[in-house]
Amino acid sequence: MPRFLIIGGSDRAEREEVLERLTSALSAAGFKVGVAVHLPLAPEEEKGEGNGARRFSRAGAVQVLITRGKDAALRGKQGGLTPLKRIGARYFNAADILLASGYFDPVSLLEACLSDDPARLKHLKDPRLTGVVCRRLRPGLPVPVYLLDDLAPLVRAVMECGGTTPL
């Protein structure tokens, strides 16, 4: 089963930019990356070059799963597995790490906050939070801060953790 990392944040475009860049950085480091995105209330995805599955595949993802709608959400444990771990076991056997967005699961959480507005950080009190990805350094945060334009320290943190342990 792959390792898991949820990308959270208050803005979908920011989460997807971090997902794309992190997918590229982890793929370049030799990881087989899977991407799972759940869009509970999103309209049908735009067609063309910007569509999520192609975007993440071009970034180096070996597998991509995008689900939409409230009814598609998996809830509760089944067979001892949380929703994200069930998806990992069923669809992402070829992946070393599964980057996910739109899932609430008790695995490591990385918050995407690319704007300069500190009020946009919505997960600071979440015990799953293991880091924040920003465009600029933000001193004083209680977790590591990774710069979007230099994800090498985050890739190293992923490489150092094993299995499903937090970063």
Image (spheres, grey):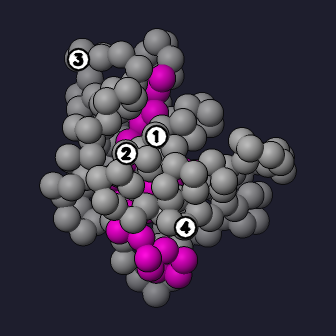
Where is residue 123? Give x, y as percent: 42, 35
The residue sitting at the left extreme is 160
Q: Is residue 69 visible?
A: yes
* Magenta residue span: 89-114
Residue picked out by circle 4: 63
Decide: few, some or many residues near mark 4? Use Cα within 10 Å; few <14, some 14-19, many ≥20: some
Q: Amino acid at mark 1?
A: Arg
Earlier residue among tags 4 and 1: 1
The kind of residue on which mark 2 rests is Ala
Q: CA distance from mark 4 to mark 2?
A: 16 Å
Q: Is residue 66 above or below residue 167?
A: below
Q: Earlier in the sequence, mark 1 or mark 3?
A: 1
Q: What's the CA distance linking mark 4 and mark 1?
A: 16 Å
Is residue 113 rendered to the left or right of residue 10?
A: left
Q: 10 Å neighbourhood of mark 3: few (<14), some, or many (≥20)?
A: few
Q: Quadrant of residue 149?
A: top left
Residue that carries the numbered disc 2 in the rendered image:
25
- At 44% from the left and 76% from the top, the residue drawn is 94
Q: Secondary structure at mark 3?
A: loop
Q: Earlier in the sequence, mark 4 or mark 2?
A: 2
Residue where numbered disc 3 is placed: 140
Residue found 80% across the figure and 46% down from its top: 48
Name of the residue lying farthest toward the top: 116
| Mark number, residue 83 | none
Which residue is denoted by mark 1 in the rendering? 21
Alpha carbon distance from label 1 to label 2? 6 Å
